[in-house]
Image (cartoon, rainbow, N blue to C red):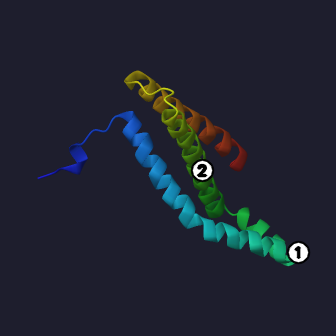
Amino acid sequence: YLNLLRIRLPVGGVVSILHRVTGVLLVVSLPFSLLLLQQSLASVEGYERVTALLHTLPVRILLFVLLVMLAHHFLAGVRHLLLDLDIGISRNGGKLSAWLVLAAVATVVVITAGCLFP
């Protein structure tokens, strides 16, 4: 029997899986983002409704999560591109680049939280 809770992935595997998950979630959120953009561009009243919606706490939290997912997906994607170019392909290089991605995402989390939740 396979106990999934006992499997310990290396940090590179965790970053890779999170890259895939964030990609799927960003694609799922795209229609809603485009709908808000379309409504904000349709009229002045639509723009004011979208602006008022973006100032509510639940939407700010959702926006925060989306921005963190976008940052992780982008940075992990750059890491994967560098690995495809044989940069950081060694075991230590892969581990270091994965930790650097997580550290950069943590920095983005702090900056984004400071901007969205003053």
- Closer to the N terminus: mark 1 or mark 2? 1
Between 21 and 36, the residue placed more toward the observer is 21
Query: Residue 63 occupies which quadrant of the picture?
Result: bottom right
Q: Position of residue 28 (x, y in %)?
A: 54, 66
The local secondary structure at tag 2 comes to helix
* Residue 118 visible in the shown view: no
Q: Which residue is mark 1?
A: 44
State the residue at coordinates (39%, 34%): 11
Q: CA distance from mark 1 to mark 2?
A: 29 Å
User: What amino acid type should be assigned to the residue bearing mark 2?
Assistant: Leu
Coordinates of residue 17 in the picture (x, y in percent): 41, 47
Residue 84 versus residue 116: which sits nearer the camera? 84
Give the total of numbered labels: 2
- What is the crowding at mark 2: few (fewer than 14 residues within 10 Å), some, or many (at least 20)? some
As drawn, is 118 to the left or to the right of 74? right
Question: In the image, which is nearer the foreground, mark 1 or mark 2?
Answer: 2
Left or right of 90 in this view: 39:
right
Q: Which amino acid type corresponds to the residue marked 1 in the rendered image?
A: Val
In the displayed image of the protein, which residue is found farthest to the front?
Answer: 85
Spot occupied by residue 62 in the image (x, y as percentages of width and height): 60, 59
Q: Which residue is mark 2?
A: 70
The percent coordinates of residue 25 (x first, y second) are 51, 60
Q: Residue at x 61, y 63 (%)?
A: 58
On residue 84, the disc is none
The answer to whether residue 111 is visible is: yes
SS assignment at label 1:
helix
User: What residue is shown at x 56% (from left), y 50% (from top)?
Assistant: 69
In the rendered image, the residue lying farthest to the left is: 1
Left-right relation of 97 to 108? left
